[in-house]
Amino acid sequence: MKIKIFYAIIYVSFAVFIVLPLLYLFGLSFLSADSVSFDTRVFALLGKSILISASAAFFSTLAGVAAAFFIYKVNLPFSGVFKVILLIPLFLPPYVYAVLFEKMILFIGVNPAFMRSGYGLVIIDTFIFMPLSVLVTGSAVSGIKPEIEESALLFTGIKNTFFKIVLKLIKPSLTASFILVFIFSISEFSVPAFLGVKVFINEIFVMFSAFYEHSAAMLHSLFLVVLSVALPVADKKYFSDAPFFSFGIRKMKINAYGGIGLRLIAFLFLSGWLFISFLLPFFLLLRDALHGGIGEFFYTFKTLFPAFLNSFILSASGAVASIIAGFAVAYKTAFYRKKDAFDLMLLIVFAFPSIIFGIAFIKFYGNIFSYFFSGIFMITAAFAGKFTFIAFKIILNSIKQIPYSLREAAKLSGISEMSYIFKILMPQIIMPLTFAFMTVFILNFSESGAVMMIYPPGTDVLSVKVFTLSTNASQSTRSLLILLQILFTAMPVLFFYFLFLKIKSKIYIVNK
Amino acid sequence: MINIKNITHYYGKTAVFKDFDTNFKAETLSCLLGSSGSGKTTLLRLIAGLEIPEKGIIRVNDIIFTENTNLKVPPHKRKIGFVFQDAALWPHFTVYKNVAFPLSEKKEKNIKTKVYEILDFFGIADCGNKYPHQLSGGQKQLAAVARSIILKPDILLMDEPLSNLDVKLKKKISEYILKIKNEFNLTVIYVTHDHREAFATADEIFVLNNGKIEDSGTPEQIKKSANEYVKYFLEY
Ligand SMILES: Nc1ncnc2c1ncn2[C@@H]1O[C@H](COP(=O)(O)OP(=O)(O)O)[C@@H](O)[C@H]1O
Ligand SMILES: [Mg+2]
């Protein structure tokens, strides 16, 4: 019975702390609806934003699936290294990446006016979210049994095998990738702000923070919410079938893809992408950032360090909450095969743009509980609301790979459910759990939309501080700030990586 | 004739074959017999061009198919049919489309007639509109065999096609195999770890152990083999 209490606590806290504020926000905005006028200009902006985000989602999925195929299926040297470096842009705050990328674009001589347009936004969003497409489509690609492709290779060439067999088989994950990137892109406000491109989310942001037209901001945001929620829900069958973020261990390379032509194409594509998306921009950043000498570096480091600590604590507590809730829901979905409303709720909440989280939380907690709930709590709750869905998906995939019979055997030998969870299941999925924790941590760490709403600008959360400081900074100071943000992101990643390696080796010894 | 010369093939650091030589006769049903892990599947995959060896030459009728790490002829131009151990039907295609796919890739005409002719031959015409997951194990295997011979290949490679089936189906399918072999003048290499199955169907038997041929010959010759491993293997 203990387990029921555990579930009750999780469900109730999620409902009260995360869903209620969102409902409250919409209640409020409907109450004041008649005092708000809708502007057709704003709808034109919504159309433009949809076009931009849909294009970015399309190109990101296209490039992502090509990279996934090359990484998982073609025998290449260093494909593990490719995979890791390829993911970096996803783990940086979008704003940071935009600064990096623009440097490179200007360096290679592209017209700056072109970059500061809708086209530029599509390009940058494509590069930011392409790693997400690699993760989503990659887990589907690596899930195809080699014989399925090999039996096609006996009748047709590599090209047709890819288009007629591989692509058709992973269709759900292509849709999932498109929808995910679309949702992330359309609710991302810092990149268009940086480029000076007007999009819908920025209009909401301006209404809310500059003109204090709260009801108008909220009502307009409703369109975005409906759009973001409708897509994955309408496509729920595909969306929930797509094995995204699986933690593949199996080796899936196809030796018959070992011809020199394909390997060369794969190698050139991947290394070209790495060079343009990260290596060259990073090199240019380094060059600019270290202009002020080592003294300025340490001075800025010291200035940012308190913000880093805050961000670390906030992100870690958000990630812990997400992992607990995500695990609970995943466990239930995997073993009880009971589809309750909760996983749908996770999905819906996930689809909310994060600045709307920020608005909802500050309204709700600010009005009702202002003495009890600090910004820290609000931010943690916003993180948990936003990214528990991701944790849930990663964990669910890993639990599904554990044979069902292990649980039945445990049951038959009289082991309690809690013991099964902690002594048998957990040790087996410790690596995917680590991966889920790290992913959610990093997403929290680089999140700035909700945080910016909740904290007034200028306070100490790293992503926001870097964003605000660098708005008015000189070229080299801005580069330094961006470089430090990257370093500060790498530090916890490495820290957790080694911590969990240690845990893993301990568990391994215990199991022996 | 399939001529395999000096083949060395590694998985990671362990060699499955080292300077391996053998020949399979044309228009013959050769059985590759050996315990699991002996390299049977790998040998079929090398012949089909699904594995690339570190070194060695694979020739068919004096045409070089594989030379060292190069696939001189890609798998789909080798005129080889391959039946995988677990059928490996394409899950997103119906049985009809699974069998029709090779024909449509070759831009052949009268696809429908050809497909239903062969499905009829295997007694699974009524499964044409079903998807692989809706079939029984035997039907899957029959559909896989149908797919592998639809282009009238010169060579048919079969990897333990009967291992998951019941006795009655085994008998039925091995009769089919003999029938198609004679009808199409096929060269067949048939992999099994079951010596009864080998004796029942083979013209020639090759006993494989740890990447080496211990002995080969007609079923009668193998039964009387003086090789210690072959004697040991046939005891069970
Ligand atoms: N993809 C692979 N990776 C690593 N080792 C493999 C792989 N495939 C087969 N092996 C190893 O190669 C040896 C031969 O395998 P295989 O040809 O499948 O044998 P058989 O079909 O006779 O059972 C075995 O020791 C097996 O473990
Ligand atoms: Mg085998």
Image (tube, coloured by chain):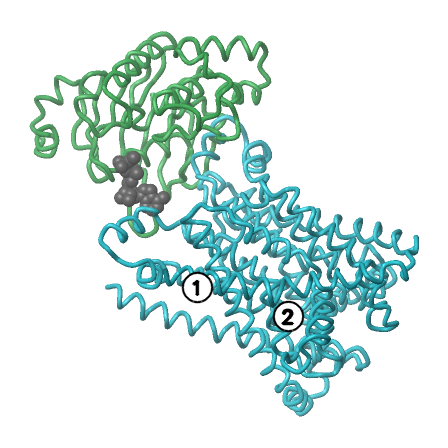
Chain colours: A cyan, B green
Q: Amino acid at mark 1?
A: Phe
Residue ID for mark 2: A446
Q: Quadrant of residue B159?
A: top left
User: In the image, A383: left or right of A30?
Assistant: left
Q: Are marks 2 and 1 in contact (CB under 8 Å)?
A: no
Identify the secondary structure beneath mark 1: helix
Upstream in sequence: badge 2 or badge 1: 1
Please give the name of the residue rendered at 66% of the width and 47% of the height, measured from the top-left corner.
A178
Quarter of the displayed picture in which ligand 2 can be seen: top left
- Give coordinates of residue B2: x percent, y percent: 34, 24
Please give the name of the residue rendered at 30% of the width and 50% of the height, measured from the top-left corner.
A406
- Give coordinates of residue A461: x percent, y percent: 66, 79
Whether labels 2 and 1 belong to a single chain: the reply is: yes
Q: Amino acid at mark 2?
A: Ser
The image quadrant where one finds the N terminus of chain B is: top left
Chain of the residue where label 1 is placed in the rendered structure: A
Q: Quadrant of residue A389?
A: bottom right
Chain of the residue where label 2 is placed in the rendered structure: A
The 10 Å Cα crowd at callout 1, few under 14, some 14 to 19, many 20 or more, is few
Q: Height in image: B190 above or below B209?
A: above
Q: Height in image: A239 above or below A80?
A: above
Q: Quadrant of residue B67?
A: top left
Q: Height in image: B189 above or below A395?
A: above
Identify the secondary structure beneath mark 2: helix
Q: Nearer the viewer, residue A161 or A321?
A: A321
Please give the name of the residue rendered at 21% of the width and 28% of the height, measured from the top-left corner.
B33
User: In the image, B228: left or right of B17?
Assistant: left
- Give coordinates of residue A175: x percent, y percent: 63, 43
